Amino acid sequence: MNIKNLINEYLGDTELQFIRILENITKGKEFKVYLVGGLLRDIVLGLKPNELDIAVEGDIDLLIKLLSDNCSIIQETEFKTFKLKYMDIFVDIALARKESYIPKGSLPSITIASLQEDLSRRDFTINALALEIYPTSSNYMIDPFNAIKDINDKKIKVIHADSFKDDPTRIFRAIRFSERLSFALDDETLKLLDQDKNRIAALTPPRILNEVVKIIDEIYPLPILLKLQKYNIFSHFLPLEKEINVLFENNISTISNWDYFILYLSKHIDELTFNESMNRYPISKKTRTFINNAYNLRRIIKEIKNSSVDRLSIEKFISLEAIIQPSFDAELCLSSPDEEEIICDLILRLSHTKVLINTQDLINLGIQKGKNIGKAFKELKYKKFQLTLKTKEEEIKYIRDSFF
Ligand code: ATP
Ligand code: MG
């Protein structure tokens, strides 16, 4: 395998340019710099890697300082890992390190180590490859765990028997990679996964959420979720079982996978249970609003079904206006064709709520500036939503009749 050719073939111009900068900056200095991890796995597989992963032996702070003229530092952790942005690409640079997990399952403590030790703390053999780019621009893979063989055999294999105990997030990773790459879990790894999967319960919710988000962000999340379900792992995240079978089946929606996932779950879990479960996770304000909107919309639809759209209060109309936005796929909240009709009607009505008179017209009519103007607009919109006002004259008449 001519690895240099592969690198030139699969990395983009910007990535290659970054590597050249790295080589120039390190010249004559006491660093050892390697390409590592998923990047090399992907290249061996003939895939374009999604980011540059780099490991460094030496003074990483100095290296980052030297790079700071060309890159911006996006993130820096206490574990001496850095995320940089160079032009439009992201680069992960980390100090070669050892990790010890005491107690097992907790976040590791880190000590500086050789590249060999760094490779042996990695999750799977297929991710434990390295290629020296400085001081030697090497053409040989450093492959202490036979990663290339496992990549060719399409096998996900842990590096040591305590791997899942040390870090149970690797269980999610194993399933994610196996489905993404169509690799099988090696027999022994599968046995360990089965034996250690209960340790996921000891992970903190943010660490679980982090893994779930990575899964949902995959191009094909459903097979991964189904595997998690098969191994009884999904229930560690949410009390949902058979419903995920059809998840993402019809995602022709323009909303993100994550928003789709949230909407879908909210359809199958009652509000209280869902909120109780989600409250354990550090989910964003945007996601929270999304969840509330989904439940509120369903409540409004139910009310319309039991009564009529014309009986909807002005407060409910205002919340509807806020909910039905292009960024929210209201149709995904529906469970029957008659609900679809209701939503279409609501969308149509909302498209007719543009008020034709302006602030000056209201002032000319005798409405006082300030709060009253806002109130008048709100009522006009509400009446237009109810399809009782159409023309500008009708709007003026409504103001005259109801405000004085
Ligand atoms: P992706 O294509 O999803 O980016 P990746 O293999 O690059 O896959 P990252 O999450 O970007 O995965 O991590 C980069 C590398 O860091 C991995 O290849 C792996 O060697 C190592 N790594 C990441 N998470 C863990 C973990 N929990 N335990 C051990 N090693 C890990
Ligand atoms: Mg990566």
Image: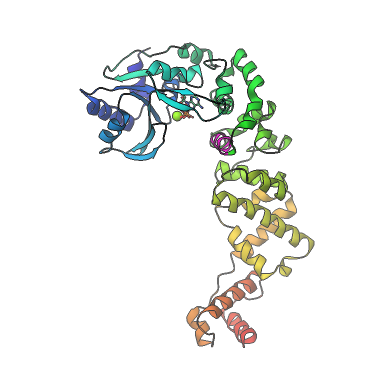
Camera-side residue of 24 and 77: 77
Q: Does the magenta stretch mainly form a helix, a strand or a loop?
A: helix
Residue located at (57% from left, 37% from top) = 216
Whereabouts is ligand 2, in terms of quadrant?
A: top left
User: Furthest residue to the left?
Assistant: 28
| Quarter of the figure with the N terminus | top left
Q: Is residue 386 visible?
A: no
Residue range in magenta is 206-215
Q: Is residue 123 visible?
A: yes
Camera-side residue of 97 and 286: 97
Residue 325 image offset from top left, x and y in percent: 57, 57
Residue 97 image offset from top left, x and y in percent: 41, 23
How many numbered marks does the figure carry?
0
When the figure is inspected, residue 340 is found, relative to residue 361, above or below; the finding is above
Horizontal side, residue 1 vs residue 328: left or right: left
Camera-side residue of 157 and 1: 157
When the figure is inspected, residue 107 is found, relative to residue 278, above or below; the finding is above
Horizontal side, residue 190 vs residue 56: left or right: right
User: Furthest residue to the right?
Assistant: 306
**77 is within the stretch colored magenta:** no
Horizontal side, residue 77 vs residue 345: left or right: left
